[in-house]
Image (tube, helix red, strand yellow):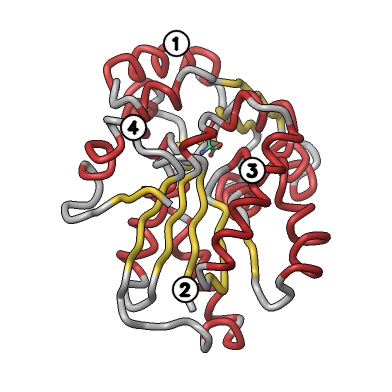
Amino acid sequence: MKIGVFDSGLGGLVITKAFIEKLPEYDYFYYGDSAHLPYGDKTSGQILSYSLAAMRYMIEQNCKIIIIACNTATAISLRYIQQRFIPQYAPDVKVLGVVIPTVEVALQNNVKKVGIVATSATIRSHIYQQELKKIKTDVDIIEVASPELVPAIENNKFDLAEEFVREYSQSFKTVDSLILGCTHYPLIKEFFRKYLPDVHIVSQDELMAEKLQNYLYRHPEIESCLRKNGLREFKVSSLNKHSQKVATNLFTDIAITKA
Ligand code: DGL
């Protein structure tokens, strides 16, 4: 059985790359639901229904553990998937999200003020605010939605993305940590570091692999079901003319195919 990574598009490849670098022996199955991208602009009902369809598909593809690398899908769908869908549909499968691991890292070093930049749906859910406050009740929080960034990245328009990052950075001058609360933003983390040199930029590609490694270590009943042939499959629900280029910037020998 495989480790599955789900995202609304190609952004989750950055997290997958980090998983493969740290844990290369496992078989991975990546699924990007690019036909419905961006999730960030959709209603909660739409996001939940796309996420459930993705879970069904990935479970059929023999994923034993699925990491929802998409913050928007984690924010809107994870609780329902874990509490309602999985117990009925595939009780042996584990589904994990990205929000709690990210919050744990953002709150390291006694921070007082945390910023979050994410899609409109993630910001609207206030999931980061809720999880931050559960751990540190007196933390100050600034949340900003940045709907332009994902389309710019998926279409390989990095100059445009940098312009937006420069503008958004103005809101975060006073924070200690800034959570890049979208799977696509690790691809432009250096822009955030350039415009916010004194802020701890929390980028999920730098933290999720260690969290997954710890999880597998603590759950040998899952780990022992995973095949270790080093196989990788990358599927998307729709290919656009930039998909291969964006993917090839990350993996030299990647073949992305339509699911
Ligand atoms: N990958 C999604 C996330 O992490 C954002 C992309 C989208 O809007 O679909 O929130």
Q: Quadrant of residue 23?
A: bottom left
Whether the residues at callouts 1 and 2 have beta carbons within 8 Å, the answer is no
Label placed on residue 2: 2
Label 3 sits on a secondary structure element that is helix
Q: Amino acid at mark 2?
A: Lys
Which of disc 4 and disc 3 is earlier in sequence? Answer: 3
Which residue occupies the foreground of this view, 101 or 55?
A: 55
Q: Amino acid at mark 3?
A: Tyr
Which of disc 2 and disc 1 is earlier in sequence? Answer: 2
Label 1 sits on a secondary structure element that is helix
Residue at the left extreme of this rendering: 252
Number of the front mark, 1 or 4: 4
Q: Which residue in the protein does label 1 denote?
A: 167
- Name the residue rendered at 76%, 35% in the picture: 45
Label 2 sits on a secondary structure element that is strand
- Name the residue rendered at 44%, 22% in the picture: 149
Q: Amino acid at mark 4?
A: Asn
Which of disc 2 and disc 3 is earlier in sequence? Answer: 2
Describe residue 177's horizontal placement relative to residue 112 as left or right.
Answer: left
Q: Which residue in the protein does label 3 denote?
A: 50
Is the CB of mark 1 within 8 Å of ligand 1?
Answer: no
Q: Which residue in the protein does label 4 denote?
A: 240
**3D distance between C-alphas at marks 2 and 4:** 26 Å
